[in-house]
Image (cartoon, rainbow, N blue to C red):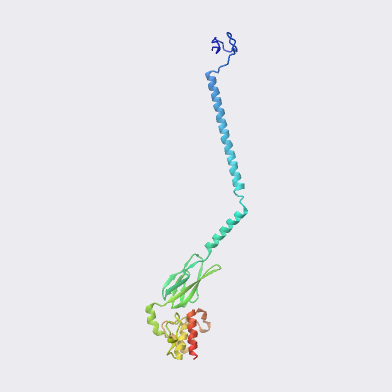
Amino acid sequence: MKCKNCGHEIQQGDLFCENCGAKIEPELTRSGKNAQNKQSKGIDVKIIIIAVIALLVIGGGGFFIYQNFIANDKPEYIAQESEEDSKDSDSKSSKLKVSPDELEIEVGENQFLDCNQDDVTYKSKDRNIATVSDSGRVKGIKAGETEVTVTYGDQKVTCKVVVKEDATAALQNSEDYVFPNSNTQLLTEADLQGKTAEQLRIGRNEIYARHGRKFNDEALQNYFNSKSWYSGTVEADAFDEGVLNEIEKKNADFITSHENR
């Protein structure tokens, strides 16, 4: 090794040059430099590993705090709104809906009611006009109007049912009635003109006979027994005039007013 100041050869371990007296700066050997570089790299790797571990610990702790304290610590009003929204949703989904709300069928025809709930019951107000099965199938029995009530828990929905006679049957049976359309059309003075008191009496009772009423008057009962459309199922004392539709009620009163003239 030589002095950097004068170029004089110096010995290993000399601190000053013998020739010029300059201070000798120690030089690292190649192996020393390599060792120092390796040591430096080792320190850098350790620092990186420690930093990664520190970030994982901090991140995990933050997530734990969020999950257990922040996420679950929702304001009370938000929780209440969520519960109310849930209740409203359940209420809407459980509301009973039936379609159609008015059903028009012919005698002998079947049609189903569509309901948005499963556990429901069906009931016909007048089974002599229309019946309804447990599955919601409505069948027209004879011409007239009635109602089918659908019940779901404490909810009830009513469907109006109008049963009409088909044109062929109406033509065939028109001669069996004094007033063929007294259940669907309001009678006029022209309809009653020329009718005897007995015909008026029979015509008025036709309205009740259509709903299956029996009669205490033997002659009147025999008269209706002779009609193909009649089916006596309700005793006179048990008959409920509530099964009559508004047209039938008005026609019965209208005929009665003429019977008393």
Q: Quadrant of the N terminus?
A: top right
Q: Position of residue 157 (x, y in %)?
A: 52, 70
Q: Is residue 242 left or right of residue 15?
A: left
48 to 188, vertically: above or below: above
6 to 51, vertically: above or below: above
Q: Give the residue drawn at x 49%, y 84%.
A: 252
195 vs 226, nearest the viewer: 195
Q: Position of residue 101 (x, y in %)?
A: 48, 70
* Extreme-top residue of the structure: 19
83 to 224, vertically: above or below: above
Q: Is residue 52 left or right of residue 112?
A: right
Q: Position of residue 90 (x, y in %)?
A: 54, 60
Q: Is residue 237 left or right of residue 223?
A: right
Q: Position of residue 61 (x, y in %)?
A: 60, 41
68 to 17, vertically: above or below: below
Q: How many marks?
A: 0
Q: Give the residue drawn at x 56%, y 58%.
A: 85
State whether residue 214 appears in this view. Answer: no
State whether residue 84 appears in this view. Answer: yes
Q: Give the residue drawn at x 43%, y 70%.
A: 111
102 vs 229, nearest the viewer: 102
108 vs 14, nearest the viewer: 14
